[in-house]
């Protein structure tokens, strides 16, 4: 692909949230991806304020927003699906019929391998080329340079297209589901740690022994910085808990598919969902102090849990 092609080839997003806007911001700073369209289900929300905010997001990013998925996908050679895990299969099915022949469909959603294989069948049957894409780190601060994994039969073409966009992708050799297996199984630990921190810190705070507990853990695991980690983990769940809960349901499915019980993942779902539903603004509250964040969560939990 020539430099001119890299700037003018149309890219489309299904879902225009944190990941999509971060990728786009990085591309634009690098002079890439001039033609970008986006469709997000929030543009069809019954809530006028939600619709207005999403259209404002499109305007601020300089992206061509669309009211229908087919309008966003028309003529797009590369399509990135970046929705919540519970909407990933619906997004793939709704997009399939409107993909340009041979378009690469990057499913970057946090889903179980089984979910991705089902989505792949829909995309491939419609003439698209499905790519299992796993986003392996937070999209800030690296933006389009965030580490990615790809797998499936179109991995070579996918890597070439991502390289043209100066993205940091590697192949996870194997069929569709390989990249997502790595992502999902890693999340047992990463998102599970967040849930463990919540239960430990909130219980410790309520009992008045949180500092003693965290200090003792620092003795057991020197250098981990439990108090600092506690603040970070709580902020992540307060900010992204609903999305993380959807991901952890897919993680549990992944473990189930492997013939094991996804009980730990399901327990993490409960904490992620419960705290995410509180819709607390961690940064406004004071994200650097785990005690302030914990007290804010405890103050908003259902009175029956007190």
Image (spheres, helix red, strand yellow):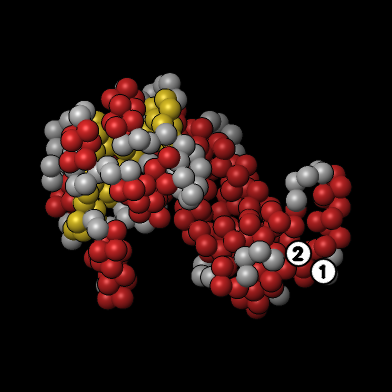
Q: Residue 293: percent from the left, percent from the top?
A: 65, 68
Q: Quadrant of the N terminus?
A: top left
Numbered label attached to residue 98:
none
In the image, 209: left or right of 21? right
Q: In this view, does 218 lie above or below 241?
A: above
The residue carrying pointer 1 sits among few (fewer than 14), some (14 to 19) or many (20 or more) residues within 10 Å by Cα, namely: few
Element marked by disc 2: helix
Please name the residue shown 63% across and 70% down the image. Answer: 286
Q: In the shown orientation, is residue 281 left or right of residue 14? A: right
Q: With respect to residue 200, does 49 lie above or below?
A: below
Q: Which of 126 and 61 is in front in this view?
A: 61
Q: Mark 2 points at which residue?
A: 203
Query: Could you say where residue 204 lies in the image, as x and y percent from the top left?
Result: 79, 64
Q: Position of residue 160 (x, y in %)?
A: 30, 26
Viewer-side residue, 110 vs 6: 6
Q: Are marks 2 and 1 in contact (CB under 8 Å)?
A: yes
Residue 257 visible, this orientation: no
Q: Residue at the location (35% across, 51% down)?
A: 25
Q: Is residue 104 left or right of residue 74?
A: right
Side of 205 where 62 appears, left or right: left
Front position in the image: 204 or 93: 204
Residue 38 appears in the figure: yes
Q: In which quarter of the image is residue 67?
A: bottom left
**Quadrant where the C terminus lies?**
bottom right
Q: Which residue is drawn at 15% across and 50% down?
A: 70
x and y percent of residue 202 in the render?
Answer: 72, 65
| Residue depicted at x 27% and y 48% | 13
Q: How crowded is mark 2: few (under 14 residues within 10 Å), some or many (20 or more)?
A: some
Query: For the residues marked 2 and 1, what is the alpha-carbon distance in whole angstroms?
Result: 6 Å
Label 1, secondary structure: give it: helix
**Circle 1 sits on which residue?**
207
Q: Nearer the viewer, residue 273 or 173?
A: 173
């Amino acid at each position: 692909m020539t430099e001119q092609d890299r700037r003018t080839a149309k890219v489309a997003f299904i879902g225009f949230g944190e990941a999509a806007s971060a990728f786009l911001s990085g591309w634009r700073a690098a002079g890439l991806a001039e033609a970008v369209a986006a469709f997000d289900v929030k543009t069809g929300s019954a809530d006028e304020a939600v619709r207005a905010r999403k259209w404002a997001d499109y305007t601020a990013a300089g992206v061509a927003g669309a009211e229908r998925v087919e309008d966003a996908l028309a003529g797009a050679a590369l399509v990135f699906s970046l929705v919540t895990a519970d909407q990933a299969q619906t997004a793939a099915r709704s997009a399939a019929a409107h993909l340009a022949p041979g378009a690469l469909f990057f499913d970057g959603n946090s889903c179980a391998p089984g979910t991705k294989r089902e989505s792949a069948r829909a995309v491939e049957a419609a003439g698209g080329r499905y790519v299992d894409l796993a986003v392996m780190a937070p999209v800030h601060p690296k933006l389009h340079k965030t580490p990615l994994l790809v797998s499936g039969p179109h991995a070579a073409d996918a890597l070439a297209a991502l390289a043209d966009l100066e993205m940091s992708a590697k192949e996870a050799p194997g069929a569709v589901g390989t990249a997502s297996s790595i992502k999902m199984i890693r999340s047992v630990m990463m998102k599970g740690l967040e849930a463990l921190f919540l239960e430990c810190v909130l219980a410790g705070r309520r009992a008045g022994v949180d500092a003693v507990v965290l200090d003792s853990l620092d003795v057991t695991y020197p250098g981990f910085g439990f108090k600092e980690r506690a603040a970070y983990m709580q902020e992540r769940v307060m900010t992204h808990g609903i999305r993380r809960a959807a991901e952890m349901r897919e993680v549990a499915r992944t473990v189930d598919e492997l013939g094991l019980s996804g009980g730990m993942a399901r327990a993490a779902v409960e904490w992620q969902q419960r705290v995410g539903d509180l819709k607390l603004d961690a940064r406004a509250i004071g994200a650097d102090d785990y005690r302030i964040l914990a007290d804010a969560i405890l103050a908003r939990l259902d009175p029956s849990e007190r």
